[in-house]
Image: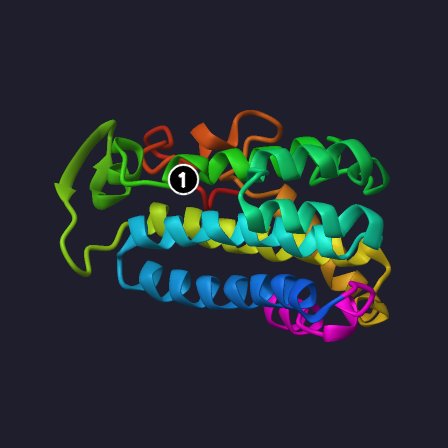
Amino acid sequence: MLGPVLAIGLDRKNFSHLSNPDLQAMPYLAVCHVANAVKASALSNEQGMHSVAVCLVRQCVEAITIFEISLQDRSFAEPLLMAWKEGSKSQGELRRSLENHVWTSYGTGLWEELWAEFFGNLARSVQPYAHYTPELQGWQFATVNYSGGHEFTVMVGPGTYDALQASRVTLLHCLVGWAMARVLLASKRNSGIRQWSVEIDELGRALAKSKLLFHRADWGAQLAPHMLFLPGHDWTDE
């Protein structure tokens, strides 16, 4: 359902309350970046380039923050957008402003956690992949023939595919889409999102049941490339 959510997000009436075309262009381009980054991430993921795929997810999360700020009242949105453009506020500072002034009205995340906890977990799960670090390099190894408590890792070359890593990246794509949908629903700025409210709710319930997320623990560890399941179990178990 990411396609319809992105289409609604690109509707320019979301940003018509902002005072000038420059400010209106910033969130529009942010949504464009989410659309393009998810597309490129999914393609990279399918081709086994999981480290490239997960880097792009991090940028999606950051772009959603710019989009979300733009949906708020002009007096709140415009100073933050300009501060971000001028480099005087970081992504973390922008999220703290949202947490202090906006997120309290969003309700809960996937379970009963506050929205700040949900989005904080999502952001932290991809935070290590801003640069080429040992954590990111972990996505360049594939685990094969994992059974009986034995694992064999091989260096990833072009096209080396790890099914569990690919599933983790796909889960992140779904979390990005659901987060963006919830942001639109909460803002009430675009009525077109309401026709998708049932599907948004169903997706949230499905994500909450994912075997790749152990509820409210640290997603950064759960979605790391080499978090493995016990022998005889995997993420498809009922």
x and y, in percent, of residue 82 in the image: 65, 50
x and y, in percent, of residue 230 in the image: 36, 28
> What residue appears at the point 58 percent right and 53 percent down from the top-left corner?
176
> What residue appears at the point 27 percent right and 35 percent down from the top-left corner?
133
Residue 237 vs residue 135: left or right?
right
Q: Nearer the viewer, residue 69 or 155?
A: 69
Q: Give the dominant element type of the magenta stretch: helix, strand or loop.
A: helix
Residue 166 vs residue 222: left or right?
left
Task: Look at label 1 and name its amino acid.
Answer: Asp
> What residue appears at the point 51 percent right and 64 percent down from the top-left corner?
33
Image label count: 1
Residue 128 vs residue 5: left or right?
left
Q: Is residue 12 magenta?
A: yes
Image: 36 above or below 215: below
Callout 1: SS = loop
Quadrant hosting residue 174: bottom right
Magenta segment boundaries in residue numbering = 1-19
x and y, in percent, of residue 27 in the image: 64, 62
Quadrant hosting residue 128: top left
Residue 52 vs residue 115: left or right?
left
Q: How is the image coloured?
A: rainbow
Q: Is residue 46 magenta?
A: no
Q: Nearer the viewer, residue 18 or 109?
A: 18
The crowding category of the residue bearing disc 1, from other C-alpha atoms within 10 Å (few below 14, some 14 to 19, many at least 20), is few
Q: Which part of the image, by quadrant, shows the N terminus? A: bottom right
The answer to whether one can see residue 206 in this image is no
Image: 35 above or below 110: below
> What residue appears at the point 33 percent right and 38 percent down from the top-left corner?
225
Disc 1 marks which residue? 234
x and y, in percent, of residue 132 in the image: 27, 40
